[in-house]
Image (cartoon, rainbow, N blue to C red):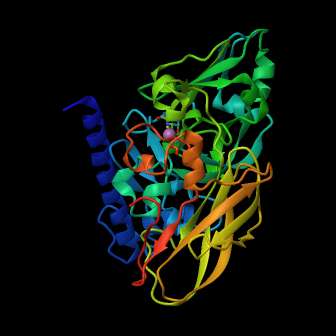
Amino acid sequence: MDSKQSGRRRFLKHGAALAGMAMGVAGSAVGQTPESQSPEAGAKELLAYGKRSRFANAVRIPSDPAVEALTPIHDSMGIITPSPLHFLVMRFRDLPPDIDPRQHRLLIHGMVDRSLIFTMDELKRLPSVSRIHFVECAGNASPLERWNMATVQGTHGRMSCSEWTGVQLSLLLKEAGVQKGASWLVAEGADAGKHQKSIPLTKAMDDVLLAYGQNGEPVRPEQGFPLRLVVPGWEGVSNVKWLRRIKVVDQPIMDRLETTGYSVLRPSMKGKSLWFNFEWGVKSVITYPAAGARLAGPGFYEITGLAWSGGGTIRRVEVSTDGGRSWKDAQLQDPVLRIAHTRFRFPWTWNGEETLIQSRSTDDRGEVQPTLTAFAKEWGVTPDYFKTTDNWVNHFNAIYPWKVNRDGSVQNGLFS
Ligand SMILES: Nc1nc2c(c(=O)[nH]1)N[C@H]1C(S)=C(S)[C@@H](COP(=O)(O)O)O[C@H]1N2
Ligand SMILES: [Mo]
């Protein structure tokens, strides 16, 4: 048994214990109060911090083989992901560290005039901002995720969108005084494996946040409590959780993670690889009806989904319900925010025949979500390449059709 496996088992065991606890609590809601908790205590708890209806049942699902959990985006409404359903990636396959915020420190050092150490209280005294941004793993919707192509949660569940509150990194870097010649920083987390990531200073000074708030309350332990980096629009791995150290440097660290897992090797690049490919392109997906859903029969359905861009604001979403022959504009739901999920809606009457439904987004830079054929062309391959390759396919943002069958079942229309 390797250490990865034992870590995963530990995690799952813990997960089962949590599930058991949750059942006990739900039981009390129907009057089967466990011995350990009086009805008064139950009521007090409910008044102090509410819980969802026992009939509401959207859950994250684990993904294999990493310790990851995927957001049930087929159940999503609006643009904010409920914090308990935010997807999560534990690169070191362990439980989130249990950090006492009173003990936690953030160190900023390296090529700065003054090294700084902040407590959480000190960080919270600084001017703050709240911003709505998505976080999306580089592998979200990757055709390599062959283990679960049957549901939209499996294909697109590695993304979530939250309101993040915290301090702008630029503020702290100015306070520390970045020295001449510095061009990168390395951010490090307090998890067992000390996840670290190089980030160019230009991005750090632009819009990177040190977030301690998520959707109006402290960042969840799974999301990096008490402090995480939010690097808007960039692949998830940059958003270092349990942030404890920022070192200002003059070159990226080039650790194994950066030079292998997240670099891009495309056949068209003839043996060379692209190391610094951070920003997500323009993307969208229909979340209902999507793979895994079943339509009750012909008639009216509201097609709805999410659109987003790693470098801009969504301007337009078009929907096709006839296999891509014709496209019509979907309605965008306010608010439409920069580097955030944007909800779109499209009324549709299904005639009961087999068809493909799909969405295509455009951002304010005029970037249009590519077809699979266009995406493949960019890679210098044929679309079939993605069905068989074992090479990393990160930043997959091609238009993703769902196939509606005559029996109402909906399945993956791109890879199955
Ligand atoms: N410290 C730390 N930060 C981390 C990770 C990690 O394992 N440890 N995983 C990264 C990856 S690969 C992704 S996709 C995002 C996911 O953020 P989430 O778990 O809050 O959804 O966190 C990133 N930050
Ligand atoms: Mo990731």
Q: Position of residue 82 (x, y in %)?
A: 57, 59
Q: Nearer the viewer, residue 1 or 349?
A: 349
Q: Position of residue 140 (x, y in %)?
A: 51, 48
Q: Residue at left 62%, top 65%? A: 359
In the image as oriented, which residue stretches furthest toward the left? 1
Q: Residue at left 72%, top 16%? A: 183
Q: Position of residue 219 (x, y in %)?
A: 58, 44
Res 54 quadrant in image: bottom left
Image height of 128 relative to 145, above or below: above
Q: Nearer the viewer, residue 57 or 196?
A: 196
Res 122 quadrant in image: top right
Res 332 quadrant in image: bottom right
In the displayed structure, does residue 284 sit left or right of residue 153? right
Can residue 290 be seen at all in this image of the molecule? yes
Assign the N terminus to one quadrant of the image. Answer: top left
Image height of 74 relative to 163, above or below: below
